[in-house]
């Protein structure tokens, strides 16, 4: 499955936006409180969250230079490092995803950098919260596809986590044809544009993970899950 998906994201958690702003219980003035809400609304208006998801069987695992390397069937994508090897230990397949909040978010950030620096900071935090919601929606698609194969999902893991290198990004994005599908490009230092973009991999397993969530309500995919909408659960 590599069709571009558009995500209907009508809200973000205000607490998440405050978290990205470094909020730790400080008193917020009524004026700033109202501005945060207005900026979040504006971010939702200009964003165009979309994503691409594909599943690949694990082709094998070997060691190169003393580090584990996981290869995926039919791709040039290699997941290199001890942390990703531990994260995917026992996986029979891997879901690969890329999502973006869209170029409109970057355009608004540039505009605010000239007109309203406070709003720019809040908008940047809102964009970060929004793209994580988009990643949750893409993860829900992986969960649904995995369930269709009788498999169970682990948590998502992105390049740059642990010792999975950011140098994974070019091949991962090429594997998903993300530049054509989503307009995501990379700078020379491997930063994505649009800036509010996320890539990740998710392990698919034949048995539920020991860290499986106790209920659907605790799952970040809850709002987007097609299984829940049909009255089923994934058994994560």
Image (cartoon, rainbow, N blue to C red):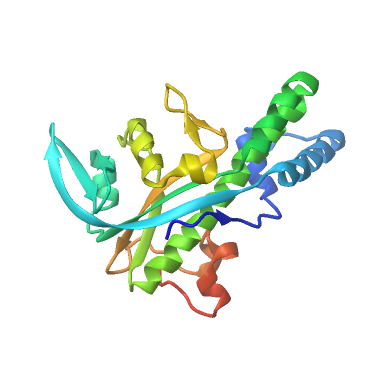
207, above or below 114, in the image: below
* Left or right: 221 as drawn, with respect to 171: right
> Looking at the image, which is closer to me, 26 or 189?
189
Q: Is residue 147 above or below residue 21?
A: below
Residue placed at 77% from the left, 45% from the top?
41
Taking the image as drawn, is residue 121 in sight?
Answer: no
Left or right, 82 with respect to 127, comes to: left
User: Which residue is at a point 34% across and 72% down the rendered structure image?
Assistant: 149
Question: As rendered, which of 217 and 164 lies closer to the eye?
Answer: 164
Direction front: furthest residue:
180
Residue at 37% x, 62% y is 153
196 or 223, nearer to the observer: 196
User: In this picture, is 120 found above or below 4?
Assistant: above
Residue 44 rendering spot, x and y as whole percentages: 72, 46
* Image coordinates for residue 13, horizontal then vertical, percent: 66, 50
Quick check: can you spot residue 142? yes
| Image quadrant in which the C terminus is located | bottom left
């Amino acid at each position: 499955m590599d069709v571009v998906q558009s995500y209907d994201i009508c809200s973000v958690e205000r607490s998440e936006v405050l978290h990205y702003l470094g909020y730790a219980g400080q008193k917020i003035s009524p004026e700033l409180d109202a501005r945060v809400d207005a900026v979040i609304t504006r971010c939702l208006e200009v964003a165009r969250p979309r994503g691409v998801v594909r599943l690949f069987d694990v082709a094998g695992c070997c060691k190169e230079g003393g580090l584990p390397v996981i290869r995926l069937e039919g791709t040039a994508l290699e997941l290199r490092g001890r942390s990703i090897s531990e994260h995917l230990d026992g996986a029979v397949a891997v879901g690969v995803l890329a999502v973006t909040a869209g170029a409109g978010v970057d355009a608004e950030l540039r505009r605010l950098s000239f007109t309203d620096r406070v709003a720019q900071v809040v908008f940047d935090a809102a964009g970060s919260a929004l793209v994580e919601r988009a990643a949750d929606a893409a993860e829900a698609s992986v969960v649904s596809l995995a369930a269709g194969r009788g498999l169970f999902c682990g948590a998502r893991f992105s390049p740059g986590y642990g010792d999975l290198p950011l140098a994974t990004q070019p091949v991962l994005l090429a594997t998903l044809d993300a530049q054509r599908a989503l307009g995501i490009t990379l700078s020379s230092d491997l930063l994505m544009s649009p800036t509010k973009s996320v890539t990740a991999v998710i392990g698919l397993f034949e048995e539920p993970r020991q860290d499986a969530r106790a209920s659907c309500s605790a799952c970040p995919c809850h709002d987007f899950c097609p299984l829940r909408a049909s009255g089923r659960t994934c058994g994560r």
